Amino acid sequence: MRIVRSFGRASLLAVALSLVLVTSVFAHECYNASASAQGALSKAENSQTWVLAVDVRELIATGSSGFIPAGSFPILDACRQEAFLTAYAQTGLPLVFTTAIKGAVGQDGVIAENNPNMDTTLGGNNKGIDHFGVTGGEIDAAVSDGYNAASASGCP
């Protein structure tokens, strides 16, 4: 019973903290949706422009990652991590989100909210540069669904 309550709270926390994540990175707005997890981590470690917003794998294993402070999310054991990641993989979202911390100039000054692609599916199609403002709800749902799958996994 304690585990069920814990995962119930985890689902609520997942949604709430995903909103915090998305809100935190709105100032930066974009991420490279088509970069591999390793590529995104490498950019965050070796670039003065890109910073780690969150590594979903680290988040569920340690309860924190990137912009998410320690103790913010419940820690999942190996069995529940597998269930979470299986559900999360079905979304097609990246495992690692990095975001630019240096302002982009953009072609003819067209970036983020001034970009005409923001009103189309191109701002959140999991190809190239996507925008948290377009995909925020999808990220929230993916994290919440992952925790729900972990809860329902039947792990010991």
Image: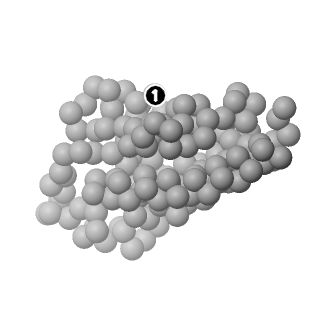
Q: At x 50% / y 38%, what residue is drawn?
A: 71
Residue at (64, 49) in percent of width and height: 10
- Residue 138 lies in quadrant: bottom right
Left or right? Give the position of 137 relative to 20: right
With 33 as the anchor, is 11 left or right in this view?
Answer: right
136 to 147, vertically: above or below: below
Q: What residue type is labelled 1?
A: Gln
Q: In which quarter of the image is residue 114?
A: bottom left
Q: Is mark 1 on a helix, strand or loop?
A: helix
Farthest front residue in view: 2
> Viewer-proximal residue, 69 or 95?
69
Q: Give the percent coordinates (x, y) of residue 137.
A: 52, 63
| Residue that carries the numbered disc 1 in the rendered image | 38
| Relative image position of residue 60 (x, y in whole percent) | 59, 37
Residue at the image point whose x is 57% and y is 53% from the top: 13
Q: Image height check: is 119 above or below 135?
A: below
Q: Is residue 148 visible?
A: no
Is residue 1 among the parts visible in the rendering?
yes
Q: Nearer the viewer, residue 90 or 10?
A: 10
> In this figure, which colouring scheme has been used for the structure?
one colour
Position of the C terminus, as image quadrant, is top right
Number of labels in the image equals 1
Where does the image place residue 51, in percent across and percent down from the top left?
31, 38
**Which residue lies at the image location 31% right of the left edge and 71% below the top edge?**
116
The local crowd at label 1, few if under 14, some if 14 to 19, many if 20 or more residues have their Cα within 10 Å, is: few
